[in-house]
Image (cartoon, rainbow, N blue to C red):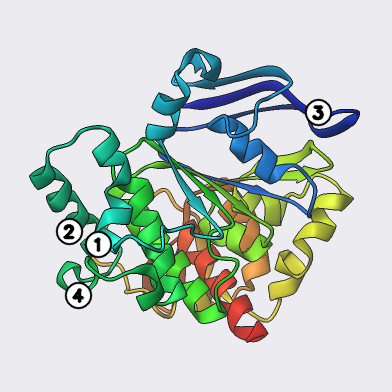
């Protein structure tokens, strides 16, 4: 879907992104993370040419992005900002309708799409479509920002620290909502964050940057179970294996039903009494585990594990 090939971005003599190469697969949430100044937002903005690369190539659907008209690129790539940036003088309906209007959709089609999207992001259309941004909460504004990015049904969504300005409860709720929404829309999402807990919770794969270089790309379980160097270990910090010694597999599995008819063969079996740290090895080798509790069994998918760990960490911090 998107490929970076030896991409460098320079500002004068300063190198912001240095010879970066990776692929983003269709339908995945690909998280860019790293400390301030590492180049993650610059990398994101080069995808839709808000920032132009210096050398190298970025491919979108197997074509260099330079071959696309800029307006066409930006219509086909939704964008959600930390600042939200809704037009204050427009209603929620008018904010969401901007790209469909530019694409000359029929009014009835736009109205139908707006109601569909507001419902999808958990906002009752009758209640919200005619309100203005200052009449709704910050969390609701960010939901509208997501709806606006999805309005013309683009294949790719860029999200630049979209939840970082929200309070912890709103942030956790929107993370959960994004996970649920992705199951419906199956978009390719490139997500920037500085928060490793958020990255572990949301990402199908994570790309950790340092001073414009890629330090590691991998799944959440690969980051937790096999950090490639000391920088990665230190960045993960308490989110790593040592930070969850007190949590057992059974703790994570409590909210999941026991399996009856589901075919669960092929997954490794782990005792419910095992530490979640001990399970990381199995999580890195499979997309799920079978939790054994007495004579009962239940399936626990990797996404469920990392969502639980991220949520428990956020709860500890509140």
CA gap between label 3 and label 1 equals: 40 Å
The residue singled out by tag 3 in the image is 10
Measuring from the top left, give residue 239's x and y in whole percent: 70, 67
CA gap between label 3 and label 2 equals: 43 Å
Kindly check if marks 4 and 3 are in contact, taking CB atoms under 8 A apart as contact.
Answer: no
Q: In the rendered structure, which disc, 4 or 1, sits on the residue that comes first in sequence?
A: 1
Seen in the picture, residue 299 relative to 191 is either above or below; the reply is below
The extreme right residue here reads: 13
Kindly check if marks 1 and 2 are in contact, taking CB atoms under 8 A apart as contact.
Answer: yes
Crowd class of label 3 (few under 14; some 14 to 19; many from 20; radius 10 Å): some
The residue singled out by tag 1 in the image is 118
What kind of element bears circle 1?
helix
Measuring from the top left, give residue 304's x and y in whole percent: 46, 64
Q: In the rendered structure, which disc, 3 or 1, sits on the residue that comes first in sequence?
A: 3
- Relative to 103, is 51 on the left or the right? right
Residue drawn 41% across and 58% down? Answer: 87
What kind of element bears circle 2?
helix
- Relative to 104, is 248 on the left or the right? right
Crowd class of label 2 (few under 14; some 14 to 19; many from 20; radius 10 Å): some
Label for residue 127?
Answer: 4
- Asked whether residue 95 is in view, the answer is yes
The residue singled out by tag 2 in the image is 115
- Asked whether residue 263 is in view, the answer is no
What kind of element bears circle 3?
strand
CA gap between label 1 and label 2 equals: 5 Å
Q: In the rendered structure, which disc, 4 or 3, sits on the residue that comes first in sequence?
A: 3
Instruction: Please tell me whether mark 4 or mark 1 is closer to you in this view.
Output: 4
Crowd class of label 1 (few under 14; some 14 to 19; many from 20; radius 10 Å): many
CA gap between label 4 and label 1 equals: 10 Å
């Amino acid at each position: 879907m998107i490929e970076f090939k030896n991409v460098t971005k320079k500002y004068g003599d300063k190198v912001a992104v240095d010879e970066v190469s990776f692929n983003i697969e269709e339908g995945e949430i690909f998280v860019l993370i790293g400390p301030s100044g590492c180049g993650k937002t610059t990398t994101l903005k080069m995808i839709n040419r808000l920032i132009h690369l210096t050398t190298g190539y970025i491919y979108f659907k197997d074509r260099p992005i330079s071959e696309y008209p800029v307006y066409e690129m930006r219509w086909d790539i939704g964008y959600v900002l930390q600042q939200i940036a809704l037009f204050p003088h427009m209603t929620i309906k008018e904010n969401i309708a901007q790209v469909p209007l530019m694409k000359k959709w029929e009014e009835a089609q736009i109205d139908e799409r707006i109601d569909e999207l507001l419902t999808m992001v958990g906002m009752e259309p009758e209640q919200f479509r005619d309100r203005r941004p200052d009449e709704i909460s910050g969390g609701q504004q960010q939901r509208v920002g997501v709806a606006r990015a999805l309005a013309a049904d683009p294949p790719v969504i860029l999200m630049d620290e979209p939840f970082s300005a929200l309070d912890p409860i709103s942030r956790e709720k929107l993370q959960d909502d994004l996970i649920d929404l992705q199951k419906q829309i199956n978009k390719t999402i490139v997500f920037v964050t500085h928060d490793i807990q958020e990255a572990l919770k949301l990402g199908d794969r994570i790309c950790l940057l340092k001073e414009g270089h890629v330090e590691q790309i991998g799944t959440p379980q690969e980051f937790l179970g096999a950090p490639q160097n000391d920088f990665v270990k230190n960045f993960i910090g308490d989110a790593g294996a040592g930070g969850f010694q007190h949590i057992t597999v059974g703790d994570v599995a409590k909210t999941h039903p026991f399996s009856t008819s589901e075919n669960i063969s092929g997954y490794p079996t782990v005792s419910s009494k095992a530490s979640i740290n001990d399970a990381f090895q199995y999580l890195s080798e499979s997309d799920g585990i079978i939790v054994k509790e007495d004579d009962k069994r239940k399936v626990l998918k990797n996404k469920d594990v990392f969502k639980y760990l991220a949520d428990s960490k956020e709860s500890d911090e509140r």
